[in-house]
Image (cartoon, grey):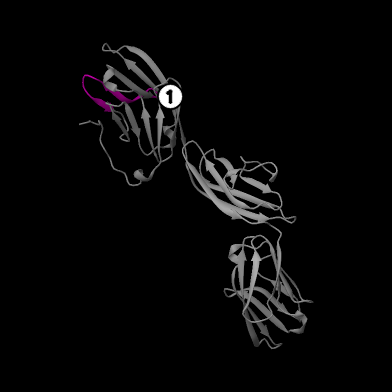
Amino acid sequence: MEVVFGLMVVLLGVSDGIETYCDGRKNGAQCYGALGGTLVLQLMNDATEYHGFNWIKNHSNLLTWRSSNSVIILPDNRLFFTPSNGTLRMNNLKRNDGGEYILSIINKNGEQTAQRTLRLSIQAPVSSVLLDSECLSEGEMRVSCSSEGGDSPQYNWTLDGRTLTDAELLSGNTETNIITLKQHISGHLVCSVRNKVSHVSSSKRLCTCGIETYCDGRQDGAQCYGALGGTLVVQLKDDGAKYNGFNWMKNQLNLLRWRSSNSVIILSDNRFFFTPSDGTLRMNNLRRKDGGDYTLKIYNKKGEQLAQQTLHLFIQCK
């Protein structure tokens, strides 16, 4: 039965950490560990092949091995050594675990016969990625990729499974977190974010910007369709000036309040524009969440509701 020397302490959350591996058998090895995670470090093939060694950081022995007796781990119980395969586990990695380590191999007389160094870098892993897009005035699309956490994040973009080309990019490149796509670019876009200890990605279906659709919303129960990222022109009434006032609402929130005695007040969203003279409302840069039920409430000059009509909006990708 294989024996692991060291006191096993079970810590809540350690099992959820990221585990990385590093081969430290060559002098000058560079290793990376995830903050809060575990590093499995291959120090040698089999510790029993050596009379003894010390594993040192900042002149402090973290591991002392003598084949004639046992392993002593000092001073950290997060470390666990398995002599039979020469691996050292470092659990619950902290920032100050980063730095240079020395493996000093000694003979039976306690004399150093060889020495190897290793450099350990600790990085916070990328935990999540948010992908957001915005249509610009000429039909281009700006897309941003925001990562949460993560040291030294590196970005990569693909469209329909392939790397974006210069012919599709107006600005930025496939290694930046913000890009601008040229007109008429659509497809399945993926932003991948990685560092030495983690890899996370996010994707979305892109639709062509700039498509304008029209809907006659003057009848109660009207169904309208808008293109994701495009513009919808809704005919609410023939002429807004014919009415003393109305509210256009979604989920009990006033998006448009019109009173013929004063002016139009647009609430909550500057993507909407109303033209009283022809009774049309423009909704620019349509989003998925713009879909749903809308209510138009019409009032008399006393503020009493005279009528109400509904409209359902569907947002589709074209």
| 39 in the magenta segment | no
Q: Which of the 4 quarters of the picture holds residue 97?
A: top left
Q: Residue 300 location, x and y as percent?
A: 70, 87
Which residue corresponds to mark 1? 118
Q: Is residue 130 above or below residue 7?
A: below
| 63 in the magenta segment | yes
In screen coordinates, is 80 left or right of 292? Answer: left
Q: Residue 153 location, x and y as percent?
A: 54, 40
Q: Residue 30 location, x and y as percent?
A: 46, 27
Q: Which residues are magenta?
A: 57-72
Three-letter code, disc 1:
Leu
Q: Which of the 4 quarters of the picture holds residue 103?
A: top left
Q: Is residue 254 above or below residue 41?
A: below
Position of the C terminus, as image quadrant, is bottom right
Q: Nearer the viewer, residue 193 or 263?
A: 193
Q: Which of the 4 quarters of the picture holds residue 65?
A: top left
